[in-house]
Amino acid sequence: MKRCLGVCYYPEQWPRNIWETDAQNMKRLGISWVRIAEFSWAKIEPQPYIYDFEWLDEVIDIMGKNGIKIVLGTPTAAPPRWMVDLYPDMLPVEQSGISRQFGSRRHYCFSHEKFVRHCELVVEIIAKRYGRNPNIKAWQIDNEYGCHDTTISYSAAALNGYQKWLKYKFSHNLGKKCNPIDNLNHAWGNNFWSMTYASFDQIGFPINCVTDPNPAHSLSFLEYCSEKVAEFNKRQALIIKKYSSSPITHNFMGKITEFDHFKVSDNLDFASWDSYPLGFLEDRISASESHRITYARQGDPDFQAFHHDLYRAVGNGRWWVMEQQPGSVNWAPFNPMPLEGMVRVWTWEAFAHGAEVVSFFRWRQAKSAQEQLHSGLQCPAGKKMPVTNEIQEISSELKNASEVKKSKSQIGIVFDYESERYWRIQPHGKGNSYFDLVFDFYRGLRKLGQSIDFISPNADSFDGYKLILIPGAMFMENKLVEKINEFSHTVLVGPRAGCRDRNFNLKGFSSFFPRFDLEIIASETFRPETPVRLSEEGCFVRYRELISTSAKILMKTESGDPALISNGNIQYLAGWPDESAMKNIFLRIFEDEKLPFKQMPEGIRERRNTGECFWFNYNDFEVEFEGFKIPSANFIRRELK
């Protein structure tokens, strides 16, 4: 498959007499794909059960005549006002009990069955009408699940659904013949603080308690919410598949982890995500102020690549960038314009990590409503934005570029959305998060010139890898444990690995690996100013464990406590390492596994595929590396033999 460019287009926001001109200009710019209709429910169904497809038929015809392939979105992320009037209780409810109101987007609760059925109805009507249309080459379901904190709702529908879900779970899945509510009380340890229940309808949300709610209660509710997202997606996907053979995707959003993206992807043909490097640097990356200033117009050197690799795994090797930032955004604390050249860098970095399509958001900057200050490829009047020259350059480069490269790295990181829930509930210290821990490991590897794969905890095997990292997996499924035991190369696990069971009860690492003598005596978190120093260079930051073991000790703290231990090919890390400690750990493993590495200059990152190597410069100055001068906000690509 050839690497392609796309764009997001909103014809319902513009007069019909410019649609043809827009399509022609897209074609001239080298745009091959256009995404449409994902927010157009009120235009498609202006009144209940009354549909208007004349405008959409015309847009699809115009794009098709200009040779532009279409991703058709289901419009369920933007329910119309009449829907809220019909079902006022479909609105999501905040923890405070206040309903979130109509007036923007994503104003629905996944648990509201009548709303979900109406979603199925409109999706079926759209899919039946356009399923065989030759211009519809792909489908997108909904838009950015979980964005704006919309995974979790505390509505009456959510409570009713959660109680039924619990009753089913504790009636069917435990293999016991006890009363289901007794099963729940036992599994959750509800004898603590007299928290026992007599019936499932007594169980509320794990919120607004006098002090912390039972973590098992919190875990079960987060699991329920995650499953509702996957179910919502599946119900739409099954309808589309009845009428169309074109592939289906959903556009995930950066650092949204409240639901399991791997489970959602079970009913997708490829994954996609929305990449906003400058917005993300300002509003969701844990970084120092100096780091934000240094990369203010370039974006973090690793955050985009992290998600590229993650969604390559989520999509089983197939993925797109559905929305690529082309200029300043409107929603971050600060919204600078990208450094000239960075849009081209971001685009080619996505291709280097295996993207089939990079689609820019949006074609025309909005003239009205909430996104007026969000850049597009054109201004509202149709004048080209400065970034257009970069898009033109990319289009020219793609004409002679190779096809999408499929490759497998030698290093894999297991990313587990379930363990993220455990950390979310019990971080044990201010600012600690599963995502940040995994991201630190990923960044550490990238600074040593490594290309990385992410792996689902439910993957069939670790074959082909020389190093598997499993940071922070507080819960470990039996399938994951089996893969670890079958693997012959190095596996690095910890901290907090295997320390909880399915219901958040304490569990020991050795219960998963009986031959590995390891007992966690105590754990602690500490202020950033008081790290635990290691006997070699580096420290533990944020978190560490005091462990008892007869295993081989590879690293110690300054006070002599085990910091890194091993039994055969399995290594256990008893803390959160800083950059120096991380480097020492990796270099030791690289030597054992004969993995090549290189110390990358600040702001320079490497990505290797089958037959090609890229070096990306995220700096605002030129850098010389391995005999090449890489200009600021630019990259070099080399053919590999």
Image: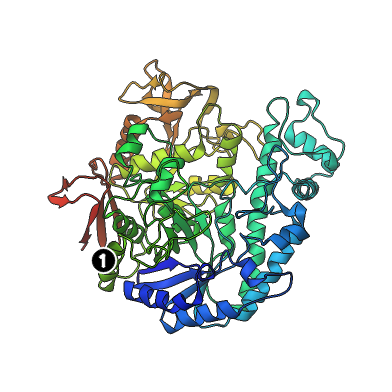
Horizontal side of residue 163 vs 566, given as left or right: right
Residue 250 versus residue 166: which sits nearer the camera?
250
**Residue 144 percent coordinates (x, y):** 55, 56
Residue farthest toward the left in the current orientation of the protein: 627
Specify the amino acid type for callout 1. Glu
Label 1 crowding class (10 Å Cα cut-off): few <14, some 14-19, many 20+? few
Asked if residue 293 can be seen in this view, the reply is yes
The residue closer to the viewer here, 133 or 416, is: 133
Label 1 sits on residue: 393
Vertical position of residue 324 compared to residue 64: above or below: above
Name the residue at 57% across, 82% down.
Answer: 132
Q: Residue at x 44, y 75 (%)?
A: 18
Quarter of the picture holding the C terminus: bottom left
Q: Position of residue 434 (x, y in %)?
A: 51, 38
Q: State the image quarter where residue 426 is shown.
A: top right
Left or right, 293 with reference to 6: left
Q: Left or right: where does residue 103 sit relative to residue 371? A: right
Q: In the rendering, at what x and y percent does residue 72 appear?
A: 54, 71
Q: Quadrant of the N terminus?
A: bottom left
Q: Secondary structure at mark 1?
A: helix
Q: Is residue 569 at least partly visible in the picture?
A: no
Query: Which residue ends up furthest to the top in the rendered image?
Result: 559
Q: Position of residue 513 (x, y in %)?
A: 54, 37
Q: Residue at x 47, y 25 (%)?
A: 544
**Number of numbered discs overlaid on the protein picture:** 1
Quarter occupied by residue 40: bottom right
Q: Is residue 46 above or below residue 557?
A: below
